[in-house]
Image (cartoon, rainbow, N blue to C red):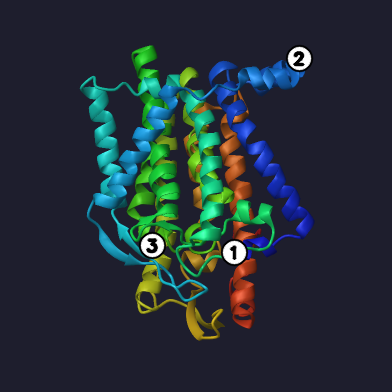
């Protein structure tokens, strides 16, 4: 059973699961409608719903069209083909609680480059205009909401009848199994990893594709791209580039190595990432802001610095693990704790916990530059409306909750060694504060 199921009390767990299952789908549509059709004004959308009630929401909700389904199908097939066919280095993931070690093909950078070059090439040569994606965005999100829900039902059934590994099983509760997932490493056949597809090749890749789409849409409408949109697009693309450069490291994180493939992860990456994570750019399409060269460059530089620090945090820990602690951290031998733990099968293993460098500042310091990065690619929208900053607020809540879940999981796994680690690194996220 996934660790995340035991972090909160049963009542909080049920309430949060049912809330997210029922509220997230309409929220995606309302956010799109507000950004695109209500001038970014939450109060305008609220007044409309107050006046028209549930029927108003039904009227707002676009019906999935053939065009939307075609765009999703072509994009999905293209990304799945790249995932399977492009060459890449063999990477072994962390050993699972049941003693399994997943094997991946690290071809994310190649898939990312091929995707963006193909997309821009189709536009440049007049074969496909990305503005079609923007113009059908509501229908695409609507189709993704329903299609991804069906996909999560498939994952639930697959987990019961044809699990890909022994890292699977039921909690005995249908809602928990559907929400948190049945399988840790579901695959179709031997080589097609479902979570790599949903999280990386669909979710993260669509972030870059939509960032470019919004930029092109503004250019086609106004004949130019505002500096605010440029800063937003460049920072998002730098962040996504960083992600694919580090993709093999991502396969060792909580999303892949601990959270199972259910609604939380898979629906989230198929729907929530494309819609919510890209929303500052969606807002800027119809709200170009002229920052001026100096301010634009300051924001750009600050954003790139934060993305670099976020990357360097992950690189530092990865290098520490790869060399088994025999490396330099900030020019010195790393400070560490050798922690032993017992696997589900009763085997005793050792793990190294890094307590210097970025990881000596706080246990999850890498979340600080990640939240600041999101702020810097959102702040070009300025402060006329609250909604563009929703992603920053959501990300902060998500990462603070993830830090708590990770701490609880590590406390359960390492016991007294984790207590020792917390004494050496007392702050969870923000050094000196929290």
Measure how far apart labels 2 and 3 are at the Cα level: 52 Å
Quadrant the C terminus occupies: bottom right
Tell us which disc is closer to us: 2 or 3: 2
The structure residue drawn at horizontal position 54% and vertical position 47%, both measured from the top left corner, is 152
User: In this picture, is 331 found above or below 187?
Assistant: below
Q: Who is closer to the viewer here, 380 or 15?
A: 15
The structure residue drawn at horizontal position 41% and vertical position 43%, both measured from the top left corner, is 202
Tell us which disc is closer to us: 2 or 1: 2
Measure how far apart labels 2 and 1 are at the Cα level: 44 Å
User: In this picture, is 70 found above or below 178?
Assistant: above
Numbered label attached to residue 51: 2
Q: For the residue carrying disc 1, how many other residues have a C-alpha within 10 Å: few (<14), some (14-19), or many (20+)?
A: many
380 left or right of 122?
right
The structure residue drawn at horizontal position 38% and vertical position 46%, both measured from the top left corner, is 201
Which of disc 1 and disc 2 is earlier in sequence? 2
Q: Position of residue 139 (x, y in %)?
A: 50, 24
Numbered label attached to residue 315: 3
User: In this picture, is 208 found above or below 421?
Assistant: above
Q: Is residue 427 visible?
A: no
Tell us which disc is closer to us: 1 or 3: 1
Q: Position of residue 177 (x, y in %)?
A: 63, 56
User: In this picture, is 328 found above or below 40?
Assistant: below
Numbered label attached to residue 406: 1
Q: Position of residue 279 (x, y in %)?
A: 51, 31
- Mark 2, secondary structure of its residue: helix
Residue situated furthest right in the rendering = 11
Q: Who is closer to the viewer here, 424 or 26?
A: 26
């Amino acid at each position: 059973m996934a660790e995340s199921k035991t972090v909160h009390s049963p009542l909080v767990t049920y309430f949060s699961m049912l809330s997210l299952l029922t509220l997230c789908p309409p929220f995606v549509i309302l956010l799109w409608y507000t950004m695109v059709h209500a001038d970014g004004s939450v109060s305008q959308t609220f007044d409309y719903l107050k006046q028209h009630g549930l029927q108003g929401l039904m009227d707002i909700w676009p019906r999935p069209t053939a065009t939307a389904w075609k765009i999703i199908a072509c994009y999905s097939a293209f990304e799945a083909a790249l995932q399977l066919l492009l060459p890449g280095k063999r990477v072994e993931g962390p050993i699972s609680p049941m003693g399994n070690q997943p094997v991946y093909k690290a071809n994310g950078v190649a898939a990312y480059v091929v995707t963006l070059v193909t997309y821009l090439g189709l536009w440049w040569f007049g074969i496909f205009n990305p503005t079609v994606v923007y113009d059908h965005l509501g229908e695409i999100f609507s189709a993704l909401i329903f299609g991804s829900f069906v996909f999560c039902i498939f994952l639930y059934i697959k987990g019961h009848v044809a699990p890909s590994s022994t890292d699977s099983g039921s909690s005995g509760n249908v809602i928990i199994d559907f929400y948190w997932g049945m399988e840790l490493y579901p695959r179709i056949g031997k080589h097609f990893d479902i979570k790599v597809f949903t999280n990386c090749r669909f979710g993260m890749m669509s972030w870059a594709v939509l960032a470019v789409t919004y930029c092109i849409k503004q250019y086609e409408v106004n004949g130019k791209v505002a500096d605010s949109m440029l800063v937003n697009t460049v920072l998002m693309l730098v962040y996504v580039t960083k992600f694919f450069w580090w993709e093999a490291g991502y396969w060792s994180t909580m999303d892949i190595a601990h959270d199972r493939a259910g609604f939380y992860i898979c629906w989230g990456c198929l729907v929530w990432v494309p819609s919510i994570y890209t929303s500052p750019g969606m807002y800027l399409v119809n709200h170009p802001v002229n920052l001026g060269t100096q301010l634009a460059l300051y924001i750009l530089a600050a954003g790139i610095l934060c993305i670099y620090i976020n990357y360097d945090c992950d690189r530092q820990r990865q290098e520490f693990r790869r060399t088994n602690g025999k490396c330099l951290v900030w020019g010195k031998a790393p400070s560490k704790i050798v922690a032993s733990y017992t696997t589900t099968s009763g085997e005793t293993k050792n793990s190294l916990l890094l307590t210097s460098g970025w990881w000596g500042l706080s246990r999850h310091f890498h979340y600080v530059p990640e939240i600041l990065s999101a702020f810097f690619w959102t702040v070009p929208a300025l402060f006329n409306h609250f909604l563009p900053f929703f992603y920053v607020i959501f990300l902060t809540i998500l990462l603070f909750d993830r830090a708590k879940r990770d701490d609880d999981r590590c406390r359960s796994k390492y016991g007294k060694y984790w207590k020792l680690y917390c004494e050496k690194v007392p702050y969870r996220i923000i050094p000196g504060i929290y």
